[in-house]
Image (cartoon, helix red, strand yellow):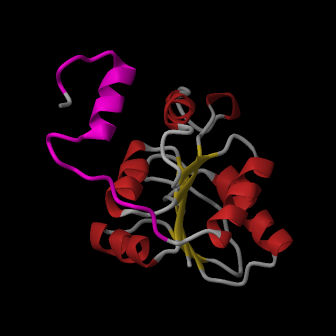
Amino acid sequence: MIFITVGTQLPFDRLLNNVADWRERSGYSGDIVAQVGEESHFAHPDMQIVKTLSSDEYYHWFCQAQGIVSHAGMGSILSCLEHGKRGVFMPRQYALGEHRNDHQRDTARAFTGQYPSLAFCDDAPALFNALDALLSEPTDAEPLEQTPQNNTLGRRIAEHLGVKGCAS
């Protein structure tokens, strides 16, 4: 099963339509559960669509999923790393009216290549390749070790932001 989450602030129908196109092209017949947000008008007969989820419902689907597909929101990225889930992320784009600025594109650039379990995609072909890889590779990633002595993610975020000494 693939779990798609687009966050709660804005719809992200471009991501949802691309996943639907991939499903048709690839012949994927597994379950897809998509949290689409209150303002989304996305519909697909072969996907389970929910507007919003409680935290418990979110983690129910998140934990069952073979992989996560999401906007490039920090909550989704960190959840994948924390729980050892493989993730495919497509950042929202300001130029397409999907967000107020391009901070998700900046986040995607900062994380690209840093964690083998995470794929960041700017367009449909890259997304299709990442989804194909998601299904053909092992289902679980190693969760990040979260000890004060080895907080790799925190250190990388601090370095990216130019903060020294805050994330040890």
Residue nearest the viewer, comparing 42 with 166: 166
Residue 24 image point, x, y percent: 82, 73
Residue nearest the viewer, comparing 58 with 140: 140
Q: Is residue 88 above or below residue 106?
A: below
- For image coordinates 55% across by 71% down, the residue present is 138
The answer to whether 147 appears left or right of 54 in the picture is left
Report the magenta stretch's main SS: loop
Count of marks, rendered view: 0
The answer to whether 162 appears left or right of 6 in the picture is left
Residue 53 image point, x, y percent: 38, 68
Where does the magenta region start and end?
140-166
- For image coordinates 76% across by 71% down, the residue present is 23
Q: Is residue 161 above or below residue 89?
A: above
Which quadrant would residue 41 be assigned to in this image?
bottom right
Q: Is residue 34 in view from this perspective?
A: no
Q: Is residue 106 above or below residue 144?
A: above
Residue 121 image point, x, y percent: 66, 45
